[in-house]
Image: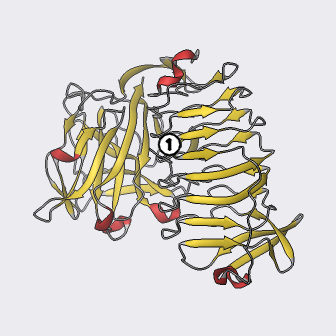
Amino acid sequence: MKKTVLFLLIPLFILTGCTIEDRRNDTENAFIVKDVEGGVCISRVRGGNEILYIPDKIGGKKVVEIADNVMSNMRRLKKIVICGDGIRKIGDGAFAGNKDLETVEGLNNLEYIGQYAFAECVSLKEISLNGSFTSIEKGTFTGCVSLEEVILPSGVRTIEDCSFEGCTSLISVTGAENIVSIGEYAFASCGRLSSIDAENAECEYDAFKNSPAGDVFDIPERPDTIFDGENVLTTVFFDDFDKDDIDLTKWSRCPEWPRQLGVWSDENSFTDKNGNLILLVDEAPDGTLRSGAIRTAGKYSQSGGRFEARCKLGDTPGFWGAFWLMPENGLPDENNGSSADGCEVDIFESPYLSSSSVNYAVHWDGYGENHKSIGMAPSVPYLYYGYHTFTLDWTKTEYIFYIDGIEYWRTSAAGIQEGASYMKLTVEIGTWAGQPVKSEWPTAGLTVDYVKTWQ
């Protein structure tokens, strides 16, 4: 069987016959550039060809950089060929989300490969990288499910968080002898990776979660307690979905209610047997649009403390995932202007794929004519690539919202609920998230690594 290989150290690629005159899509009109030290940076690309040739020079100046996000999500693109050896920097997210991209050739003398640069390039078969870079940055190859072998150059010292997470076909990593640090989730869910020769590396939490290669490393366990700035909190609920099916002592599937354009379906909530909850979006044979949803109602509820879910958001329009809290006794329809008697707290909703945003909200005074709400929508780079943690601190005086440990919003607009709430993980189909693209279904509307609460 032919191996899919990620080469990070090979002799320089020699490309012949690659000239602007020979390649009609490489005219200088195909690119918008800006001046940088030593040459120009490609800041925009026009066209939709399956093969893209990048010339050695544009306007007589050497092409030395590819800007952030500039070639991301070019769905027809299958191959990129760099003419010359001047590219020294690949920007953050530069090629991310190119689901048809199979090869990138001619990348030599690199000094930096950006965060999420090749994230979710699910068809990527081989790539040639060489240079003086010393780190594989956060999320650089996350979700590249077709890669089987990684060969690292001797200069690489650090594998940052989530760098190869979800590379489910990855079999071996060689040339890792000089690595001194492996970040959180760096090789998580690399279930076929049996070993890595990096005996001098220090590993962060969950560096090899669901990857047998981590068995030989001394990986620290996450503590059961945390300090929120005022109090020491202890873990009181945890589920990492590592069972063959949903743990029904903790969760129930939500009733099969109509929701927006679809319905919640029992069949669409399950575990993938690799430590994830999957909330699937699909179309039933009778044309019904379906999605998954689960909740802890009647099984677990909590008042105050910290609530957290680590999730991978769906990456196509037409549906959104959510992690939210509902009061045990429902949302009272009383026009009292206060959420003390109950409120819905949306720790996140994900309808904003195009702007890399999520929605925060608090709702109170019922869902009828007295309904009131407040919310905001933070934009976070690369939020729809790889996994991210979504956290709520429910204190005595306010709700505080975080993504990946960074605070984005806090509110006490209607006061704070006094009673307990249960948790919900759901996906809904509707045009709030754009028009559904059923040609890409079935697809995971939300993938959940774990849910955890502290009090």
**Quadrant showing the C terminus:** top left
Q: Residue at x 57, y 24 (%)?
A: 230
Percent x, y of residue 309: 42, 37
Q: Secondary structure at mark 1?
A: strand
**Front position in the image: 369 or 260:** 260
Q: Is residue 52 left or right of residue 360?
A: right
Circle 1 residue: 388
Q: Residue at x 73, y 70 (%)?
A: 42
Q: Is residue 269 left or right of residue 406?
A: left
Vertical order, 335 against 37 (above or below): above
Q: Is residue 117 visible?
A: yes
Q: Quadrant of residue 64?
A: bottom right
- In the picture as drawn, the residue positioned furthest to the left comes out as 286
Q: Is residue 384 left or right of residue 288?
A: right
- In the picture as drawn, the residue positioned furthest to the right comes out as 38
Q: Is residue 94 visible?
A: no
Q: Quadrant of residue 83?
A: bottom right
Report the amino acid beneath label 1. His
Q: How many numbered tags mark residues here?
A: 1
Q: Residue at x 60, y 36 (%)?
A: 161
Percent x, y of residue 406: 59, 41
Percent x, y of residue 117: 62, 53
**Front position in the image: 298 or 382:** 382
Q: Quadrant of residue 274?
A: top left
Vertical order, 193 against 366 (above or below): above
Q: Residue at x 79, y 73 (%)?
A: 34
**Quadrant showing the N terminus:** top left
Percent x, y of residue 163: 59, 40
Q: Is residue 368 left or right of residue 114?
A: left
Q: How is the image coloured?
A: secondary structure
Vertical order, 224 against 277 (above or below): above
Q: Residues within 10 Å of mark 1 (few under 14, many from 20)?
A: many
